Image: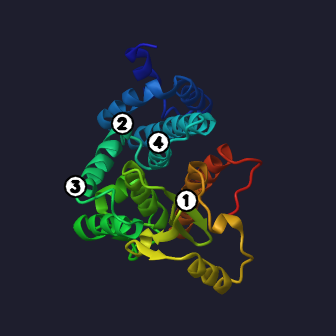
């Protein structure tokens, strides 16, 4: 379709005949993601508020479709790269964010840590070096003032603001630690996402939401008892990238519900279904 034809279609978005405007919308949506740049340009140049509003809706629908396609491909991939998964989650709110930019930001954090890191250190001391760089030098920390902000689940916002929720802080910590060749992985604790350092000789836990606090299996047992829950193996062992992305999306659902953005919460629930095994959406 030519630019002239697209322009003619957009001009019909405010047609009084709903059948015509609906047909126009369907025609534009059938063009897929390739229509997004043109629609963005038209939104900027169009002075009709109704047309602008409908263009916004069309752009959102197309961007959401693109996100779903990326998420499905990620889910079907063998690798399920964690950073790619977190990037896909972030594109729900920030569709323009580039994966390469996130990689560069994390590479810088890794480099800052590597400068102070020594592979021959005892595991606890290795973790203390990471803690020092992330939480003292780079000022990463818990976003306790706006805990329910959707931005806490968006890795690009957390890398920029240095404030996040347990899962985004753990993801950043884990990606840096793994690049340093450390056996650090996520652990799906109820109500709190944490990390574990586990090799043949050691296992302990790290709370990135509390400035990298190191604690033991006994501490987890005490925590589970306080919650009156039956202990499960998953509370102590590492989880997959898929588990992490599912949890990040569930956090996002709760964030949108807390601030009254129910339509967005429903859209994110649909994303969860795309990567669920049999539709299990439990928190």
Q: CA distance from mark 3 to mark 2?
A: 47 Å
Front position in the image: 224 or 275: 224
Question: Does label 4 or label 1 sit earlier along the sequence?
Answer: 4
**Mark 4: few/some/many CA within 10 Å (<14, 14-19, 20+):** some
Q: CA distance from mark 4 to mark 3?
A: 26 Å
**Mark 2: few/some/many CA within 10 Å (<14, 14-19, 20+):** many
The answer to whether mark 3 and mark 2 are in CB contact below 8 A is: no
Which residue is tagged 3? Answer: 115
The answer to whether mark 1 and mark 2 are in CB contact below 8 A is: no
Which residue is tagged 4? Answer: 84
Question: Does label 4 or label 2 sit earlier along the sequence?
Answer: 2
> Measured along the vertical axis of the image, is residue 273 above or below residue 196?
above
At a point 60% along the width and 35% down the height, the residue shown is: 78
Front position in the image: 92 or 6: 92
In the displayed structure, does residue 48 sit left or right of residue 27? left
Q: CA distance from mark 4 to mark 2?
A: 30 Å
Give the structural element (helix, strand or loop) at label 3.
Answer: loop
Please state which of the two labelled residues, at mark 4 or mark 1, is closer to the viewer: 1
The answer to whether mark 3 and mark 1 are in CB contact below 8 A is: no
At a point 39% along the width and 56% down the height, the residue shown is: 177
Question: Does label 4 or label 3 sit earlier along the sequence?
Answer: 4
> Measured along the vertical axis of the image, is residue 80 above or below residue 170?
above
Determine if residue 149 is in view. yes
Which residue is tagged 2? Answer: 43
Give the structural element (helix, strand or loop) at label 4.
Answer: helix
Front position in the image: 41 or 96: 96
């Amino acid at each position: 379709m030519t630019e002239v034809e697209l322009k003619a279609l957009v001009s019909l978005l405010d047609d009084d005949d709903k059948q015509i405007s609906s047909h126009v919308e369907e025609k534009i949506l059938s063009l897929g993601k390739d229509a997004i740049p043109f629609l963005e340009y038209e939104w900027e140049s169009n002075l009709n508020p109704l047309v602008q509003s409908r263009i916004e809706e069309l752009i959102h629908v197309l961007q959401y479709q693109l996100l779903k396609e990326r998420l499905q491909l990620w889910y079907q991939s063998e690798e399920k790269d964690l950073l790619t998964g977190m990037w896909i989650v972030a594109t729900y709110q920030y569709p323009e964010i580039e994966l390469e930019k996130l990689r560069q930001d994390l590479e810088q954090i890794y480099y800052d840590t590597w400068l102070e890191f020594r592979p021959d250190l005892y595991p606890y001391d290795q973790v203390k070096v990471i803690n020092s760089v992330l939480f003292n030098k780079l000022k990463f920390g818990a976003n306790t003032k706006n805990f329910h902000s959707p931005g806490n689940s968006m890795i690009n916002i957390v890398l920029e603001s240095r404030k996040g929720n347990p899962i985004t802080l753990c993801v950043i910590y884990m990606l840096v630690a793994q690049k340093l060749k450390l056996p650090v992985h996520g652990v799906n604790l109820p109500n709190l996402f944490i990390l574990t350092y586990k090799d043949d000789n050691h296992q302990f836990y790290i709370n990135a939401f509390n400035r990298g606090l190191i604690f033991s299996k006994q501490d987890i047992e005490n925590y589970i008892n306080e919650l009156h829950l039956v202990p499960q193996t998953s509370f102590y062992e590492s989880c997959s990238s898929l588990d992490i992305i599912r949890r990040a999306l569930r956090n996002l659902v709760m964030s949108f519900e807390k601030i009254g953005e129910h339509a967005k919460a429903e859209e994110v629930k649909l994303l969860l279904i795309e990567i669920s095994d049999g539709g299990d959406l439990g928190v």
